[in-house]
Image (tube, helix red, strand yellow):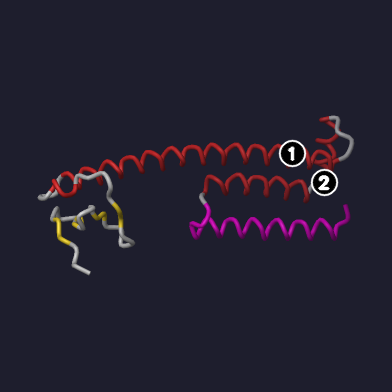
Amino acid sequence: MSLKIQIIVAVIILAALVWIANMVRRQALDIRFALSWLTVGGVVLILDIFPGIMNYLVHLLGIELPVNMMFFFGFCFTLLLLFILTVKVSKQEEQLKRLTQEMALLEERIVRCQPDSSLCRKANQRKYPSGIPVCDEGHAIIRKGEARKKKDE
């Protein structure tokens, strides 16, 4: 690889590393995910600056061309990242399910604690865009535990 291409690649990698570090600083990217990208960027930067390391690894692993090794490692990195993100999504889905169930139980407890609970125990509750649950008879469930009759239309 020519020196001109090495310099261009090094500048692009350094710019990407600075961009990732800036995203971590602004808290737009979690450090756990940024570490993998920073590690890969650092390794690629080292391989760009010292191309002899790449040739040594290619010879050591018995791969014919250095580009084949880069594609193989890129594929392995992508699979690893995909697996990590899939695990994260699965955990978040379970958390969302648990939080939704807890919220439903708390809303039910609020309904049962109303002073006029005979009106608000029905299963057919609806919510207005304000997010306040309203019983079928039109009683809004107020956070202080009071039930108020909705204004006549």
Q: Point out residue 133 in the picture as x, y percentages from the top left corner.
A: 26, 54
The secondary structure that dominates the magenta segment is helix
Query: Is residue 23 in the magenta section?
Result: yes
Q: Tell which of 69 and 112 is nearer to you.
A: 112
Please, what is the three-letter code of the amino acid marked with disc 1? Phe
Could you classify mark 1 by the number of other residues whose Cα lies within 10 Å: few (under 14), some (14-19), or many (20 or more)? few
Query: Is residue 108 in the magenta section?
Result: no
Q: Point out residue 77 in the picture as x, y percentages from the top left corner.
A: 68, 40
Residue to which mark 2 is pinned: 51
Q: Tell which of 49 and 143 is nearer to you.
A: 143
Q: Point out residue 48 in the picture as x, y percentages from the top left corner.
A: 78, 50
Q: Tell which of 92 and 8 is nearer to you.
A: 92
Please, what is the three-letter code of the amino acid marked with disc 2? Pro
Furthest residue in direction bottom, as rendered: 153
Q: Tell which of 44 and 147 is nearer to you.
A: 147
Q: Are marks 2 and 1 in contact (CB under 8 Å)?
A: no
Distance between the alpha carbons at the discs numbered 2 and 1: 16 Å
Residue at (30% x, 43% y) in the render: 104
Magenta-tinted stretch: 1-29
In the rendered view, does 43 fall on the left or right side of 116? right
Q: Nearer the viewer, mark 2 or mark 1?
A: 1
Could you classify mark 2 by the number of other residues whose Cα lies within 10 Å: few (under 14), some (14-19), or many (20 or more)? some
In the rendered view, does 94 fall on the left or right side of 132? right
In the rendered view, does 89 fall on the left or right side of 39? left
Residue at (82% x, 30% y) in the render: 61
Residue at (57% x, 49% y) in the render: 34
Residue to which mark 1 is pinned: 73
Residue 121 occupies quadrant:
top left
Of labels 2 and 1, earlier in sequence is: 2
Q: Point out residue 12 in the picture as x, y percentages from the top left corner.
A: 72, 59
Residue at (77% x, 38% y) in the render: 72
